[in-house]
Amino acid sequence: MDRVAVFADVQNLYYTVKEQHNCHFDYGAFLRQITEGRQLIKALAYATDKGDERQRRFQQILKGLGFEVKLQPFIQRSDGSTKGDWDVGITVDMLEHAPRVDTIVLASGDGDYAAVVTKLVNELDIAVEVYGAQDLTAGLLARAATRFVPIQGRLLLPIPTSW
């Protein structure tokens, strides 16, 4: 049975899926899809911590689904945008877990991961599947992956009107 580890860049998923589809990413459907016929070794979700109650509830939902949630302080840039700043942490964790898995699933469209994905595929012989918003995923990242899966259909959740 294929052993899989999952790395979800929560900030990237939130903004890209919302921008492209005006929806949220369905983490439950995602985990069900990627673990079908596979053994889940690790599921990590990387997020920012603003101390917001709604955000804490979301993090609890992720934990309930089976994700280990890693948090970093919320960073607000001078232009008003926010950054989770998890690129290096996710990269290190992917390399650390690579010896124990056959496949790594990266949920992010951030082109900064292209180098580590290339290394995992070409040097460490690990299959890497990248899930990202089709129009907002870096081409270099999608091409580096063994398989690119656009986030669409059952991986989308409508945004509640009270959100």
Image (cartoon, rainbow, N blue to C red):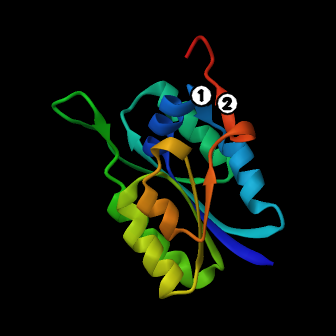
Mark drawn on residue 84: none
Left or right, residue 46 beside residue 30: left
The one of 152 and 61 positioned closer to us in this rendering:
152
Q: What residue sits 50% from the left and 84% below the top?
A: 122
Name the residue carrying label 1: 23
* Dots 2, 1 in contact, CB < 8 A: yes
Q: Quadrant of the C terminus?
A: top right
- Disc 1 crowd rating (10 Å Cα; few below 14, some 14-19, many 20+) is some
Q: Is mark 2 on a helix, strand or loop?
A: strand
Q: In which quarter of the image is the N terminus?
A: bottom right
Name the residue carrying label 2: 157
Q: Is mark 1 on a helix, strand or loop?
A: strand
User: Is any atom of residue 133 visible in this view?
Assistant: no
The residue type indicated by label 1 comes to Cys
The residue type indicated by label 2 comes to Leu
Provide residue 160's location: percent of width, then percent of height.
Answer: 63, 17
Q: What residue sits 54% from the left and 68% below the top?
A: 145
